[in-house]
Amino acid sequence: MDIRDIEEGRRRWQERYDSSRRRDADFTTLSGVEVEPVYGPPAADPRFERIGWPGEYPFTRGLYATGYRGRTWTIRQFAGFGNARQTNERYKMILGAGGGGLSVAFDMPTLMGRDSDDPRSLGEVGHCGVAIDSATDMDVLFDGIPLGDTTTSMTISGPAVPIFCMYLVAAERQGADVHGLDGTLQTDIFKEYIAQKEWLFAPEPHLRLIGDLMEFCAAEIPAYKPLSVSGYHIREAGSTAAQELAFTLADGFGYVELGLSRGLDVNAFAPGLSFFFDSHVDFFEEIAKFRAARRIWARWLRDVYGATSEKAQWLRFHTQTAGVSLTAQQPDNNVVRTAVEALAAVLGGTNSLHTNALDEVLALPSEKAAEIALRTQQVIMEETGVVNVVDPLGGSWYVEALTDRLEEEAERIFARIKDMSPDGSMTGGILRGIEDGWFMAEIADAAFTYQQQLEKGEKKIVGVNRHTQSIEEPLEILRVGHEVEREQNRLLAERRAARDQAAVEAALRRMIEVARTEDNLIPAMLDAVRAEATLGEICGVLREEWGDYSEPARF
């Protein structure tokens, strides 16, 4: 790219910057030195066409001309434990301490579409997140928190659609304008088959529900993002950075194909797709991964799927620091790891961020540990100066080379996935890869290689295979007692006894009638939720209709 093209690009960027809203803040260094909002090459640079300016295609340097000068990332701490009342108290603490949005963690029975009194829920209620059995639990979860004014993310995939319906009913009961709700639902079922293994049905019924949700949100709740395509769980299962990048974006392409197959306009539904990435401890590799993700997504949406609007080409993403990087040995070191990973996410341009607590490797976060995790983000935001310049590492020879390399590796993986497809689509390749166990095998091989390197000492973890002596004292951790399960089951029994059972049964029958047609299932499911049908009852009748799914045994 010659100097005239670069100067023209800077002029375009300046126009966007001048016309954009900016925060009223001090954008100087700690020593009082004025810094420019963005930096570019002083002379002709052949690489710059792939790097570009912030706020324009290919969005390598970010979606907005102003970067964090316009608005900082949303501090969105992931939280949930015990019952809805206990989690509501934690949410109020997070919001009161400066959190900008909520992110709901559900317990295992909820994640699997089971009620708390299901025999298979025994001993699990409230232990890895909050227990939600019905819309009344959702009322309690958000009591005193106006859903019309609070962006809420919910990390759940298998029973995502009935949980979404409960969230919608809770908003209705608050008197909120549901058409204006803003939030994110994970819903990403592909990653369940690939990595996390929390599904309810075979892929096809899940995709039908996701398609119904995409249609419903596009028509009724345009600001709400019905899909957060998750790479986090793929990375936590042991993948490399390139595999996380490629598998996640391939899943995203599959959902684009699903929307197109429903006759939806890509420019209308693609802005409702968001992403969820892991930020691991290799600082520069993670920054390069985030930059490559934006560039790849923009190019594929424009050139392969025909998106013409900028918003449809944008890859917006939430980041969580790496749970697998936390160690039970010397857990105070986890504060440092989390800070480094959070800084990588910020320098990579994340739109929202969760920082893990130091004790999460042992249990759900204590209130003190949760506050330290929150303050970690606030120190980065308020003290370090990294918000002053858009993509400050842009143009670094090392970062740009890593960005290019990760993009090239991702493209090779995309080609491999499409080669598996019987019809040449990305969706077909994903489904075949799931059926054949290809994704799982690729991740297992990567995890095995890394474990071998750890055991040989080629990769080092402080406190684990290096610098193992310590003077630290044992942590006091949060424990969820059995009384939580007993109380949840008591409330569930009372609610079942107080509801109109005939209305529940009629709503469930109607839902199954719609499930046997091609009509959108969301309105009928909403009616069942309004009648106080439980999560287990809704998922149970769908299991009876669609059957369970078991992963084939492989050796």
Image: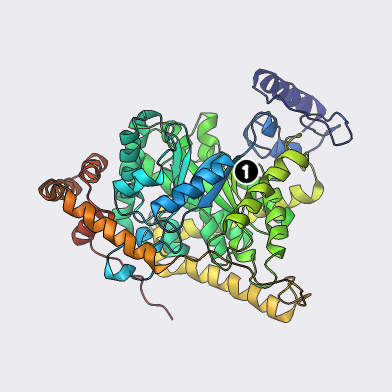
Residue shown at 19%/58% (left/top)?
545
> Where is residue 208 shown, x and y percent of the image?
30, 49
Report the side of 459 relative to 494 (left or right): right
| Quadrant of residue 423 within the rendered picture | bottom left
Q: Quadrant of the C terminus?
A: bottom left
**What colour scheme was applied to this rendering of the protein?**
rainbow
Q: Is residue 144 visible?
A: yes
The residue depicted at 38 percent of the width and 40 percent of the height is: 260
Q: In the displayed structure, does residue 549 sit left or right of residue 193?
A: left
**Amino acid on which disc 1 is placed:** Thr
* Quadrant position of residue 491: bottom left
Residue drawn where x is 83% and y is 33% of the image: 44
How many marks do you count on the picture?
Answer: 1
From the top left corner, tell me how far across and down residue 429 is, in percent: 43, 58
Q: Is residue 431 above or below residue 139?
A: below
* Residue under numbered circle 1: 350
Measured along the vertical axis of the image, is residue 404 above or below residue 19?
below
Quadrant (top left/top right/bottom left/bottom right) for the N terminus: top right
Residue 42 lies, in percent from the top left, at 86, 32
Residue 39 at x, y percent in the picture: 80, 33
Answer whether residue 433 is visible to the viewer in this image.
no
Q: Residue at x 63, y 68 (%)?
A: 475
Q: Is residue 551 above or below residue 261?
A: below
The secondary element bearing badge 1 is classed as: loop
**In the rendered view, would you say 372 is above or below 102?**
below
Mark 1 closeness class: few <14, some 14–19, many ≥20 residues within 10 Å: many
